[in-house]
Image: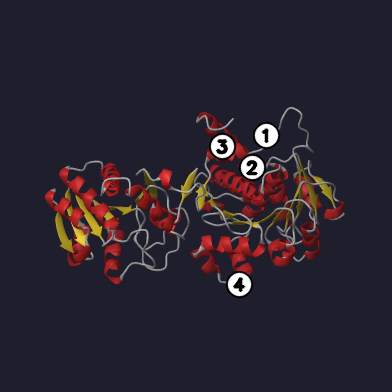
Amino acid sequence: MRTAYGVETVRAAERRLMARLPEGTLMQRAAAGLATACAQLLGRVYGSRVVLLVGSGDNGGDALYAGARLARRGAGVTAVLLSPGRAHPGGLAALRRAGGAVADTGAGERLIERADLVVDGIVGIGGKGGLRAEAVPLAHAAARSRAAVVAVDLPSGVDADTGEVRGAALRANLTVTFGTHKPGLLIDPAREYAGTVRLVDIGLRAELPAEPELEALQHAEVAALLPEPAAESDKYRRGVVGIAAGSARYPGAAVLAVAGALRGGAGAVRYVGPAGDAVITRFPETLVSDRGPKRAGRVQAWVVGPGAGDDAGTVAEVLAAEVPVLVDADGLRLAGAEAVRARTAPTLMTPHAGEAAALLGVSREEVEGARLAAVRELAGRYGAAVLLKGSTTLVAPAGGGGAVRVNPTGTPWLATAGSGDVLSGLAGSLLAAGLPAVDAGSAGAYLHGLAGRFAAQGAPVGARDVAEAVPRAWRDVRAGARDRGEAG
C-alpha cells in the first residue's frame, strides 16, 4: 500500500528525526537519492548538461547538493538562482567546489533550451498558489525544451496537501519525493504534473503516524478484501445484491449495473424495475421482479439509481431498507441529504464530478480542482461513504474523517457511457458479499479500473467490454498477490 501524509505531519516527523541525527544528514540523504534518480534518467552523466532551478528553501538545497554529485561525475551543472541572496549556502558552496556554475534568471531560458536535464527545486512542499512571476518563463522554457524535468519532492506550483493547481506550475517527467508520498502527488490535477513518482527512503517512516491522510491500495490489499466462497457456500451465503435501476428511457443502465453485479462476488442478483425484459434477455440467471424493492425478496445490499429517471418512490423505498445501500446517478439527485443521514446501515454514494458539484452547490470546475476537499465535504455532509469518480477516483469514509483512498488503476478509456453503471453493480455486489462501504468502493474501483485497462489495451471500449473484463482483473489481482506471497 502506498500512503501519503500532509505537509505539517511530514515536517513534524522530519523535526523529530533531525533531532537525533547529525546536522545536514537528512538533506544529504535526499540529495543522494535525487542524484541517483537523475543519473539513471540521464543514462550517461559525463558530458551531460544539467540546469538546476533553485529557490530559497530546502528543496533548493537538495537540488544544489544533488547537482554537486552530478558535477563530480562529469556533468556540466549550472544553478539558476531565483533568490540569489537566499539560496542554501552549504549547497551552493558544494556545487561550486564540484565545478558547477551559477547564473541568474536572465540566463535561465537560454540554459534550459540547451539542457539535457532540468531539476526543479524552486518551491518546497509548503508552497501555496502557482509559481511566482519570475519563475513562469522558466517553467514555459522547460515545457518547450527537449530536456527531461525532475521535480524535487513535488512539482513547483502544485499544492502538496490537496492536489490543487491554482496557477502556473512546472510539469515534470519524474518527481523524486522523500520519506513519504504527499497527497498532491496522487490526486489530480496535481498528479498530472508529477509524471512518474519515485519515493526515496530517508528514514522517516518510523516517525510518521499509523494512519495516513491518503492511501492507495495495491494488489495485495485488494486481494485480501475480495470474497472467496468456502466449501459450504451457497448462493445465499455468498450474498444477494438487489439492483433497482433503469427506466423506459434508460433500460441499458439496468443491464450494465446487473452485468457489474454478476461479476462482483455475490451469489445472486435480484433486479427490480421496468427493464426486466432487457435484463433477463441478457442475463437469464438474474432474479427479476416487478413488485418493488420491499417485495423483491431478501437481499444483503441494494444498488439504486442508475438510469432511474424520476422514480423517487423506489429510491426512498431502498433507502428505508436496513441493509447497505449504494446510491448512484439519478438516485443521488432523488435521495436527499436527510434520508441518507437518517440511515443506520452503511451507505455508499458514487457521484462523478458533475453530480458532486450539484450535491455541494458548487461548479464542476471547483470539484475537479479540489477533489480531496470535495469528497471529504460530501462524506461529512451526508454521513455516508463517498466514491468520487474521475481521473483519480477517491473514496472517503462516512463523516469525511480518516484516511481517504485513491484508486491507482484505470484508464482514460473508461470515460464512456455506462461505465459508471458497471462500477455501481460491481461495488454493490461487494457490499452484499459483506465488505464495509469503503472497502467495497475501493476494491470495486480497483477492479473496474484494471478491467478497463484490460478491455481497452489502447483502443476505445464500451461499458459491456469493461464488465466482461472484470473476471480477468479479479484473477490478475489474486494471482499477482500470490506471486508476491502477499495474499492467500
How far apart marks 3 and 4 lie (CA) works out to 38 Å
Q: Amino acid at mark 2?
A: Glu
Tell me the number on the disc at residue 215.
none
Q: Which residue is mark 2?
A: 468
> From the viewer's perspective, is the residue at label 4 or at label 2 nearer?
4
**Spot occupied by residue 445 in the image (x, y as percentages of width and height):** 59, 48
**Spot occupied by residue 332 in the image (x, y as percentages of width and height):** 69, 63
Indicate the secondary structure of the residue bearing disc 4: loop
Which of disc 4 and disc 3 is earlier in sequence?
Answer: 4
- Binning the other alpha carbons within 10 Å of mark 3 as few (below 14), some (14 to 19) or many (20 upward) gives many
Q: Which residue is mark 4?
A: 361
> From the viewer's perspective, is the residue at label 1 or at label 2 nearer?
1
Which of disc 3 and disc 2 is earlier in sequence?
Answer: 2
Tell me the number on the disc at residue 477.
3
Q: Quadrant of the C terminus?
A: top right
Q: Which residue is mark 1?
A: 228
